[in-house]
Amino acid sequence: MLPNLPAQRHRSRRRALALILCCVAGLTSLGALSAHAAVSVNDDSGATVTLPAPAQRVVSLSPHATELLFAAGAGDKVVGVVKYADYPEAAQRLPRVGDNSALDLERILALKPDLLVVWMHGNSQRQVEALRQLKLPVFYSEPKHLTDLPAAIETLGTLMGTPAKAQASAEAFRARYEALRKQYASRTPVSVFYQVWTQPLMTLNGTHLVSDVIRLCGGVNVFADEPALVPRVSVEAVLARRPEAMFTATPGATKSDKPLATLDSWRKWPQIPAVAHNNLFGIDGDLINRPGPRILDGARAMCEDLDIARSRRTAAAQ
């Protein structure tokens, strides 16, 4: 008896279709499992932060952390921010939960976060510990170097379940950084004094993130060798080190009742090369002081100002 070929072909097609549907169902299940799989990363304190699934409701407790979260592609998962978290524009419309030093704990709890991103040395540790006691996961964020920032974005992307967007943002940062480094690596060094405050007179040492920016632009921090991160110095010490350029932060979104430090008082000391050549520069504090993606905008501004200082040095020598 001859086999029924059409019937066999029909059964084969049914078996193949069933196999395909089974595979699709399996892949869908794996995707669902992946979306809800536990994630684990190390934060900037060295602690391991583990979540049962990527965070969906995060409260950011510093402006720089907010910028990092948006850069990581997780802006739609940020449900609360602190005062001065003004970038990107979407962050301005989010609920406020106090400021860096005084958090509104009740407001934070009402937002039902599954993750807090905390500024390690900027937030009130007593209040952060109170939130910890309520079993809220805490991720400490404090990138110390420019080259730490891409990894910081990628780490938050892992926690938030947005690794592809985070990687793209991190790679864009690396490319911008490398372009600046190549452009300014061979420029003639310029000695720099960076003023944080006037009364008392304060600056930054060589391990601070801003010193990374100074080095990137071909500058040399005249107080890089100070042991304290934010040392107090004397007018006499600045006079002795004869900086060729002086910088300070100008008001951005972070305005206070007290005006930020200015460099005008140094004009009484024309023996300082920076004063003699009018190399007194201000940079938007939000661009230079926040360890977020926009710090490269601040770096670009500083690099251009140092080029002005170089040109004035050359003109004075002629």
Image: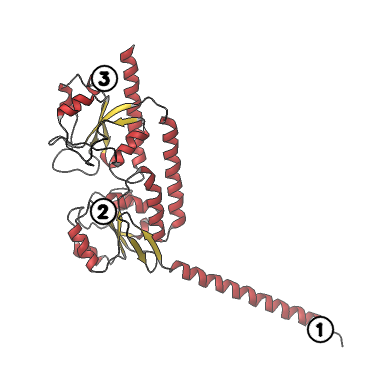
Label 1 packing within 10 angstroms: few (<14), some (14-19), many (20+): few
Asked which quadrant contains residue 268, the reply is top left
**Circles 3 and 2: CB distance less than 8 Å?**
no
Q: Is residue 7 above or below residue 299?
A: below
Callout 3 amino acid: His
Which is closer to the viewer, label 3 or label 2? 2
Instruction: Pinpoint residue 74: horizontal percent, then vertical percent.
Output: 38, 57
The first of marks 1 and 3 along the sequence is 1
* Cα distance in 3D space between marks 3 and 2: 39 Å
Callout 1 amino acid: Asn
Asked which quadrant contains residue 98, the reply is bottom left
The first of marks 3 and 2 along the sequence is 2
The first of marks 2 and 1 along the sequence is 1
Q: Secondary structure at mark 1?
A: loop
Asked which quadrant contains residue 302, the reply is top left
Quarter of the picture containing the C terminus is top left
Which numbered marker is on residue 4? 1
Quarter of the picture containing the N terminus is bottom right
As drawn, the residue found furthest toward the bottom would be 1
Which numbered marker is on residue 120? 2
Residue found at x 61% / y 74% = 21
Is residue 185 or residue 77 the one in the foreground? 185
Residue found at x 29% / y 45% = 290
Q: Secondary structure at mark 2?
A: loop
* Cα distance in 3D space between marks 2 and 1: 75 Å
Instruction: Pinpoint residue 220: horizontal percent, then vertical percent.
Output: 31, 30
Callout 2 amino acid: Met
Q: Is residue 34 left or right of residue 96?
A: right
Which numbered marker is on residue 277? 3
* Cα distance in 3D space between marks 1 and 3: 98 Å
